[in-house]
Image: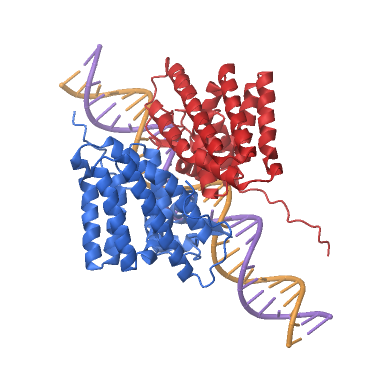
Chain colours: A red, B blue, C purple, D orange
Amino acid sequence: MVSSLKPVERPLALSDQVYQTLRANISDGKILPGQALQEVQLAALLGVSRTPVREALTRLAGDGLLCADGRSFVVPSLTLADVDDIYELRSLLEPEALRRVAAQTTDPKVHAPILDALEASRAAHEAGDNVAFMEANARFRSAWLALVPNPRLARAVELYANHVHHLRSVTLDSTKVRNVVLGGLKRIARALVAGNGDAAALAMQDHLTEARQAFVVAIGLSRAAPKPKKKALPAQVR
Amino acid sequence: MVSSLKPVERPLALSDQVYQTLRANISDGKILPGQALQEVQLAALLGVSRTPVREALTRLAGDGLLCADGRSFVVPSLTLADVDDIYELRSLLEPEALRRVAAQTTDPKVHAPILDALEASRAAHEAGDNVAFMEANARFRSAWLALVPNPRLARAVELYANHVHHLRSVTLDSTKVRNVVLGGLKRIARALVAGNGDAAALAMQDHLTEARQAFVVAIGLSRAAPKPKKKALPAQVR
DNA sequence: GGCCGCTCTTTTGCATACCGTATCCATTCA
DNA sequence: TGAATGGATACGGTATGCAAAAGAGCGGCC
């Protein structure tokens, strides 16, 4: 008996693949708000039938990443009120989540992924690489999120962070903003490695406040010459 | 323009009906944890095809009200750690949500549904009617939740409250527990009508702590072998 | 010339058929 | 007699077919 055999790599279900693909594209801003997501069209694009597409769309709508618009789903174009609501939620969750992380981890080597991501952010900032900075930023979040002892809390944080993620391509376009963000990450990381929960929570709180402010500015800019196409209704349960 | 006009009541899609039906039955504890929910069986029971059943199951799993077990879905049987996690989340959200309600409503007549539900709770408690008490309790929550200015926050609160709702039929079985709960509701309502956000948040925080404690006892009773947890952090660290 | 209504197309909602796979049971061989 | 193997069965995943509803375009009527 060869005990080194591992269970065979099973291909993910099509529904899951479609879900992840769409989710990534929404978060990255590759799918624009207001654009109707039609089942047949997506199915053709992805080379699957309507069924898994349909299931993925339903799940995304349940996550709040899509909202019903007439017959189909669209990425909600966030109003200022929406952004405020999301940041209010994040302000309730993320500082406390980070406090839990700081409180429980003493081993410095578990912080390695966080510091790696921070270093990547720093490098991307220095290189002026916007997309790399965003990517490193996301990694930073994933890294500390993986240490949150409460999985439901972690999931909630991830969910609402994703709701505004596609807007970061706008806000992080500015070197100044990136500088501020990097400073925030540094402060958070410092508090974490010091095991100082209060400082970590406070740092995250400030970080979120700054990010929200950047969004307000960004939305004000992008809505200066907006498309008069559709009214954005709040993403809600169907 | 009569702004109170609402879109006409449209016959709900089958998927939605199935979703709501299943959700209600899960919250009420009519579907027991561990019991596999099979598509064909549910479809036959509800008189629909597998498709809407499947969609409803997917959405419920996305809400966290179901979890994958092998090939099908089951209602998760909550461990003590799960209950703690859920109450940690609720403790982050509900006090602050309630604070927002207290801060924004000045008109006493918007509090009417809340006081109605409170009165119904009181009556049910006096009558010793367990199910009526639970129902009034849920109405109380719906009432103040409807006043939360942040719809996403309201939805999150509702979601996680539902996660443990089916356990209330156990905890609220005790007159003593019902008495404590009723006291908590009174205190919350008092703070709300007084417009005192701090008091409302604090009252809700205490209410949740008490409710969590009741669950711990209930789970300890219902589980033959309560496993020793090392992560049991004392109440709230906040 | 503009507005209303009708029809036709597009797209979703639901049902069902098919396929792959996991599980259970019976049979067979050691 | 026990275990292993083969088959039967049941279930979930996916594709597709069909019907109904929403939207667009066109023609008729005022």
Q: Quadrant of residue B146?
A: top left
Can residue B227 be seen here? Answer: yes
Residue D9 higher or lower than B6, as above or below: below
- Residue A226: percent from the left, percent from the top? 42, 18
Q: Quadrant of residue A74?
A: top left
Q: Describe residue B108's horizontal placement relative to residue D26 as left or right.
A: left
- Residue A223: percent from the left, percent from the top? 42, 18
- Residue B22: percent from the left, percent from the top? 40, 57
Front position in the image: B204 or B62? B204
> Exactly how many numbered labels are in the figure?
0
Can residue B14 be seen here? Answer: no
Residue B67 higher or lower than B92, as above or below: below
Which residue is pictured at 20% across the width and 37% down the height? B107
Which residue is pictured at 41% across the width and 54% down the height? B209
Residue A207 higher or lower than A193, as above or below: above
Which quadrant: the N terminus of chain B?
Answer: top left
Which residue is pictured at 36% across the width and 46% down the height? B202
- Residue B64: percent from the left, percent from the top? 48, 52
Front position in the image: A9 or D4? A9
Front position in the image: B22 or B47? B22
Which residue is pictured at 21% across the width and 41% down the height? B110
